[in-house]
Amino acid sequence: MKILQTWMEKKEQIKQLQDDVNRIEQDERFKREVEFKNQLEKLMKEYDRSASDVLSLLQPGQGHKAAEKEGPKRPLKVFKNPHTGEVVETRGGNQKTLKAWRDEYGKETVSGWQVQ
């Protein structure tokens, strides 16, 4: 019996949500927003532009986060310690083992351990 009651409640929730959706779809503000979005997407496609391109045009110098995430990653650098055979892969110079090697052997020596 409990499952039947749950089903009836869910059906009522679906009906209420559908009524809400229908009411929103009849709102003139919603219709204008959909029209604007469709026209903007059409224009972006026509000029072969992305959302990041449009944002950078509208907000120059603001550096949009989505555009920053799309940027290239730092190159992966691989170092191999000839004394221990240990290998370190890093995209920056702040890796713990690499820093320890630089302290022990010197920066120039360790930079020579970079594997091509």
Image (spheres, grey):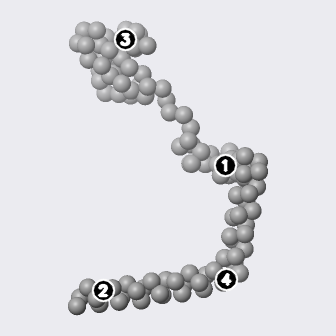
Residue at horizontal 28%, vertical 88%? Answer: 4
Q: Earlier in the sequence, mark 3 or mark 2?
A: 2
Q: Which mark is residue 113?
A: 3
Amino acid on which disc 3 is placed: Trp
The Cα atoms of the two marked residues, 3 and 1, are separated by 42 Å
Dot 4 crowding, Cα within 10 Å, few <14, some 14–19, many 20+: few
Q: Which residue is mark 4?
A: 27
Residue at horizontal 43%, vertical 25%? Answer: 76
User: Considering only vertical position in the picture, is 85 above or below 65?
Assistant: above
Q: Are marks 3 and 1 in contact (CB under 8 Å)?
A: no
Q: Which residue is mark 2?
A: 6
Is disc 2 placed on a helix, strand or loop? helix
Of badges 4 and 2, the one in the foreground is 2
Q: Earlier in the sequence, mark 4 or mark 3?
A: 4
Amino acid on which disc 1 is placed: Ser
Q: Nearer the viewer, residue 90 or 9?
A: 9
Of badges 2 and 1, the one in the foreground is 2
Q: Are marks 4 and 2 in contact (CB under 8 Å)?
A: no
Residue 27, given in percent of the width and then of the height, sits at 67, 83
